[in-house]
Amino acid sequence: MSKTDLVNFIAEETGLTKADSSRALEAVMNGVIKGLKEEKKVALTGFCTFSAVKKEAKEGRNPRTGEKVAIPARVAVTIKAGSKLKDALN
């Protein structure tokens, strides 16, 4: 499902216009980003939990050439499915 498909779904389910649905989706995404930046975790109880995890710098290899490559430190996002999401898919 693309972002456009999701906006259309939100509009159909809520009766909002597509423009309002798009703004609502953007607000949710911005809220998740803000929560990860400030608190390192966003929990949507029953649905999923987003967590910001710091990854240390490490050394890897280019699989094509075997050459060593430096992989810089970064922040990665992990997503853990909640019980309602798991139940809906199984």
Image: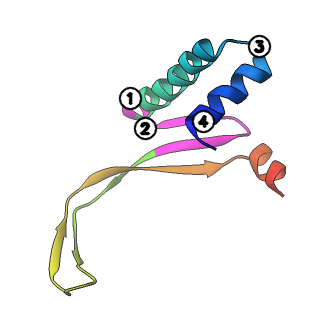
Q: Residue 38 carries which label?
A: 1
Among numbered discs 3 and 1, the one appearing first in the sequence: 3
Q: Count the marks.
A: 4
Rendered location of residue 33, percent (x, y): 43, 31
Tag 1: residue type? Glu
Q: Which of 28 and 13 is in front in this view?
A: 13
Q: Is mark 2 on a helix, strand or loop?
A: loop
Rendering quarter of residue 66: bottom left
- Up the image or down, 11 lies above or below 70; here it is above
Tag 2: residue type? Lys
Among numbered discs 1 and 4, the one appearing first in the sequence: 1
Residue that badge 2 annotates: 40
Q: Is mark 4 on a helix, strand or loop?
A: strand
Whether residue 69 is in magenta: the answer is: no
Among numbered discs 2 and 3, the one appearing first in the sequence: 3
> How far apart are the two marked residues, 1 and 4, measured between alpha carbons?
13 Å
Among numbered discs 3 and 4, the one appearing first in the sequence: 3
For discs 3 and 4, the disc positioned in front in the rendered view: 3
Q: Which mark is residue 15?
A: 3
For discs 2 and 3, the disc positioned in front in the rendered view: 3
Q: Do the residues labelled 3 and 1 touch (CB within 8 Å)?
A: no
Q: Do the residues labelled 2 and 3 touch (CB within 8 Å)?
A: no
Which contiguous range is marked in magenta? 37-51
Q: Are marks 1 and 2 in contact (CB under 8 Å)?
A: yes
> How far apart are the two marked residues, 3 and 1, measured between alpha carbons?
33 Å
Residue that badge 4 annotates: 43
- Image point 79% across, 23% down: which residue? 13
Left/right placement of residue 61 relative to residue 23 reads left
Q: Are marks 3 and 4 in contact (CB under 8 Å)?
A: no
